[in-house]
């Protein structure tokens, strides 16, 4: 595809505007993609566009678009752009880029595209280059993912250490109020949505539980006693797991059961009107 740079195509420096060049490149790439899939296409993304040399007013612009890779419904097109000054019949490279297009069916929905089989040596080189770039990008992605996982693990370990330090410094069980607050704060720092953090001490002789609570970031300064077998929501199940020597226990409450639990809990700790299901919905934008 060839275009001539006219006055309306240039900036104040007399150079072809980047936006106009990208517009021409988009057309050339769309033609190449549309020809391959024999139908309409839409631009999905533009990657790695780089400008090397400006193209002056009156120069010709030559754009070469070539498919380098096909996927299920999308195609990648590699573009090279040269400028040419007619007073010096010699082309100079201006830029290159990768465009991705999606093929559409008559209902404007993505549709499968034919596979691309590289035939010429240049096409094979482009294909190999793409594979190398993809491999490097994927490797970089894995490195970043690993680094993020390690950073998250370090954050969690630091949060656990703060909780351990608070627990080790306790002189009496009443200080578990402070531990629930520290737990709440650490969950929040890790980005975990939580409305309530509780610690329950189970007395095997009296069959009673003493619960220490932080609710909505507020530490409740007194503990609450309950008969675990009469708390039908969580504690009865937790007691059974504890007596069964389970290392972990998890139970999900939702819907009407969660509302009933909130009502029971609010009466127990004298915090009427607070429904943590509302807080969870709010935090998740529901």
Image (cartoon, helix red, strand yellow):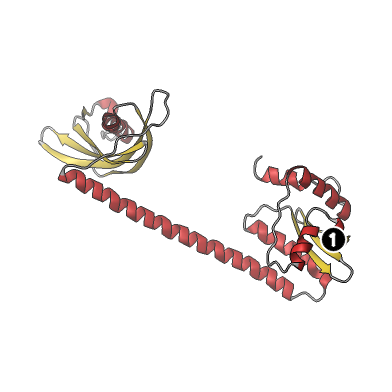
Element marked by disc 1: helix
Q: Can see residue 12?
A: no
Name which residue lies at 86% across and 47% down: 272
Instruction: Tell me which corner region of the image, top left, top right, bottom left or bottom right, holds residue 96.
Output: top left
Name which residue lies at 39% across and 57% down: 140
In the visual, does 229 lie left or right of 42?
A: right
Q: Depth check: give the residue in front, 248 or 165.
A: 248
Relative image position of residue 259 (x, y in whole percent): 79, 45
Q: Depth check: give the residue in front, 207 or 67.
A: 207
Name which residue lies at 21% across and 28% down: 3
Q: Is residue 209 above or below residue 170?
A: above
Relative image position of residue 266 (x, y in whole percent): 85, 50
Relative image position of residue 278 (x, y in whole percent): 74, 43
Q: Is residue 201 above or below residue 14?
A: below
Residue occupying the far top of the picture: 106
Residue of label 1: 228
Relative image position of residue 214 (x, y in whole percent): 78, 58
């Amino acid at each position: 595809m060839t275009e001539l740079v006219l006055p309306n195509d240039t900036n104040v420096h007399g150079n072809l505007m980047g936006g106009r060049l990208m517009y021409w490149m988009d057309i050339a790439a769309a033609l190449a993609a549309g020809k391959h899939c024999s139908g309409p296409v839409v631009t999905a993304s533009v990657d790695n566009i780089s400008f090397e040399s400006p193209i002056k007013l009156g120069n010709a612009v030559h754009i070469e678009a070539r498919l380098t890779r096909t996927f299920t419904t999308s195609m990648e097109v590699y573009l090279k752009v040269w400028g040419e000054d007619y007073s010096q019949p010699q082309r100079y490279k201006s830029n290159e880029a990768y465009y991705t297009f999606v093929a559409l069916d008559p209902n404007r929905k993505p549709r499968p595209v034919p596979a691309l089989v590289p035939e010429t040596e240049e096409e094979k080189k482009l294909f190999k280059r793409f594979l190398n770039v993809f491999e490097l990008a994927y490797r970089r992605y894995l490195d970043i993912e690993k680094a993020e996982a390690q950073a998250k693990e370090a954050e969690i370990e630091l949060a656990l250490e703060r909780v351990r330090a608070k627990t080790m410094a306790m002189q009496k069980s009443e200080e578990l109020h402070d531990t629930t607050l520290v737990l709440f704060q650490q969950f929040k720092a890790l980005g975990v949505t939580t409305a309530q953090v509780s610690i329950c001490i189970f007395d095997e002789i009296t069959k009673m539980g003493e619960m220490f609570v932080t609710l909505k970031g507020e530490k409740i300064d007194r503990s609450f006693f309950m008969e675990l077998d009469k708390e039908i929501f969580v504690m009865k199940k937790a007691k059974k797991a504890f007596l069964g020597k389970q290392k972990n226990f998890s139970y999900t409450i939702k819907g009407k059961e969660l509302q009933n639990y909130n009502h029971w809990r609010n009466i127990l700790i004298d915090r009427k009107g607070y429904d943590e299901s509302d807080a969870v919905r709010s935090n998740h934008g529901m």
